[in-house]
Amino acid sequence: MASLCQACSSSSATPLLLAKRVFSLASSPFIFMREHKIPRHCNSFRAFNAVSASSSASTSVCVDFKDLRSNELVELEYAELNLNHKISEEVGHVRIRQHVNPLSSSFSKPAPVPVWDEVYKDPSLPLMVDIGSGSGRFLLWQANKNVESRNYLGLEIRQKLVKRANFWVNELGLSNVHFIFANAMVSFEHLISSYPGPLEIVSILCPDPHFKKRHQKRRVVQKPLVNSILQNLKPGGKIFVQSDVLDVAQDMRDQLDEESNVLQHMDTVDTEDGWLTENPMGIRTEREIHAEFEGARIYRRLYQKRQLLPET
Ligand SMILES: C[S@@+](CC[C@H](N)C(=O)[O-])C[C@H]1O[C@@H](n2cnc3c(N)ncnc32)[C@H](O)[C@@H]1O
């Protein structure tokens, strides 16, 4: 185990080679978990916990993060998925445009409801929906961890990301995760209300901020979506939201706090100024990794739907 640390710390390799070396170390039987956040302009060697899959013993792998870019940190954090990087040949280059406008007519068409039996092995399992799933890595990681107990659905407005994410689903041989090209503002209700099992978790993680005042109606969290989430969520089900933009986080918080007769904020976990200090999902999203790399704070809230709702 100590040699893993030495192999990295004594390296004079380029950042990419270093990252590749860590990826190869990360292949089975090791699972890499983030132990520390990466501060801005980090100059020191950082430790990742490497937990042996075959034993509970833990050890450390050291990487010189001053040489790594945040994209490489994303690859490191998701190394255990071992995703196929030749995908660009299949779906073309995935160019990440800044924002799309979900109110434009090109995104107004409802997404077709899938045949749930065809996308999931067991469509009666509880469902987690990630709204604005981006690359899909976050949901793939969750699905890989909970193969038998939960289904996962990513709703994403950028088609190429969806195509690539579903390619990865097949590559990983997972039958409990699926991505749909959909504008969640238009399609959440009819997609989710048609799902045969209970809706257990909804996540909205670092949604596009649409900074300008006149563009804020493009933000994905709006009253009709909140109503639909509450309507479909099972009692005891959870909503997890986060953003690296305080104004966006406050906007989501205000809208969800307004539903306090139906939702309670889960402040039993560690909080600071009312925001969760840690991501409770076991892994950071890509945007979260990039933002923390830049030194930003992430504002998180976790809500639970009350078991007993007040009579209306
Ligand atoms: C900033 S990215 C965050 C991605 C991911 N959740 C993360 O934290 O890394 C926001 C994502 O939401 C998607 N998105 C924006 N508006 C959407 C909408 N109305 N419906 C579905 N996806 C949307 C964007 O295309 C983008 O991939």
Image (tube, grey):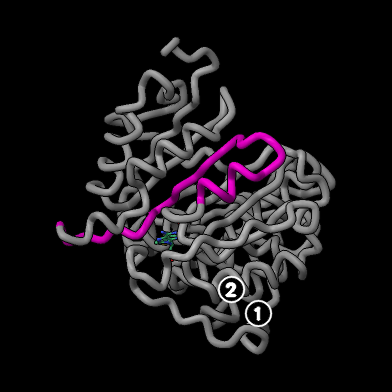
Closer to the eye: label 1 or 2 = 1
Badge 2 residue CB within 8 Å of ligand 1 = no
Q: Which residue is mark 2?
A: 19
Residue 111 lies in quadrant: bottom right
Question: At 70% across and 37% down in the image, what residue appears?
Answer: 197
- Verify CB contact (< 8 Å) between mark 1 and mark 2: no
Report helix, strand or loop for mark 2: helix
Query: Magenta residues, as a range?
Result: 188-213
Which residue ends up furthest to the left in the rendered image?
213
Q: Secondary structure at mark 1?
A: helix
Magenta highlight on residue 191: yes
| Residue shown at 46% from the left, 39% from the top | 228
Mark 2 nearby-residue class (10 Å; few <14, some 14–19, many ≥20) = many
Q: Is residue 139 left or right of residue 288?
A: right
What residue is disc 1 on?
85
Residue 293 screen position, x and y as percent = 38, 61
In terms of depth relative to the viewer, which is nearer, 218 or 245? 218
Is 169 situated above or below 91? Answer: above
Q: Amino acid at mark 1?
A: His
